[in-house]
Amino acid sequence: MMRSRSFLFGCFLALSLCAGNAAAQSYKAEALSEAPPQELASPVREALSASGIRVTGPGGPVCDIWLRKAVPAKAKAGQSLGVIYPQLTQGTLVAAIRLPNAAKDYRKQLIKPGTYTLRYALLPDNGNHMGVAPQRDFLLASPAATDQDVATISIDQLLNLSRKATGSNHPSVWSLGPAEDHPKSLPAAFHQDDGDLWLVEFRLPLQDGTAGPSPISMALVVVGSAPEA
């Protein structure tokens, strides 16, 4: 009997420790009552929401994100294979992100602490990036000091700006993913087992005409990287 009790206690303790370790590795997203950083150019800062999103993890804050008040969208968005946000045009300003510490993007490139703009881009459909992500939708990060206009820019201009974030020939890529199906209060963070990724989900306001912004759910990978990165 004593051995059975000891065995059961040992199992319970092991399960408790596993649960504690899993909880310790969890991330969360919550509303941030703070205006966009002063490092951003005035036109960019004015285009962003007055409040943001803070993502925190086991070591404290991971990043702060400010979404654009109204993101220009296509009135008629065609469907393309591997594209989950066809309403957006490449080069469109979507948000800004502040990294309190050095971080790694989806390609495991080290990004210095600081504030960056996030603009929409599609992974080239040329066969050179197969297996990077299930979808082609990404946000590219550019240093706030070098991206000072709200206007949509060309993909070549965006690539040049984003390369300044990495200091290399490759831009800083942040993968977008589909939003979770089950309802929840947003913003929220969730874990994706496939790839061991953590994403923050939010409602992005799209402006596709004279009517007011119509929000869509969007998710951004903030922790984790491509399988082959």
Image (tube, rainbow, N blue to C red):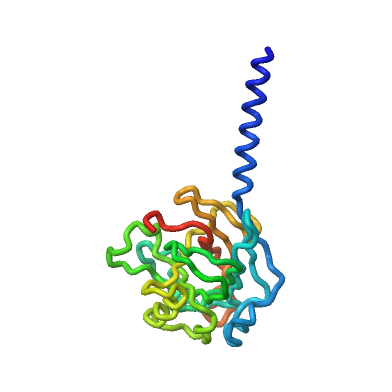
Above-or-below relation of 5 to 14: above
Above-or-below relation of 134 to 193: below
Residue 90 appears anywhere in the view: no
Residue 16 appears anywhere in the view: yes
Q: Is residue 20 left or right of residue 71?
A: right
Q: Position of residue 211 (x, y in %)?
A: 58, 79
The number of numbered discs placed on residues in the rendered structure image is: 0
- Residue depicted at x 51% and y 74%: 118
Q: Is residue 52 left or right of residue 135?
A: right
Q: Position of residue 40 (x, y in %)?
A: 59, 82
Q: Residue furthest right?
A: 33
- Residue depicted at x 59% and y 56%: 189
- Residue depicted at x 63% and y 53%: 58
Q: Position of residue 184 (x, y in %)?
A: 63, 55
Q: Residue furthest left?
A: 127
Quadrant (top left, top right, bottom left, bottom right) of the N terminus: top right
Q: Residue furthest top?
A: 1
- Residue depicted at x 61% and y 78%: 48
Quadrant (top left, top right, bottom left, bottom right) of the C terminus: bottom left
Q: Is residue 2 left or right of residue 123?
A: right
Residue 199 falls in image quadrant: bottom right
Q: Position of residue 90 (x, y in %)?
A: 42, 76
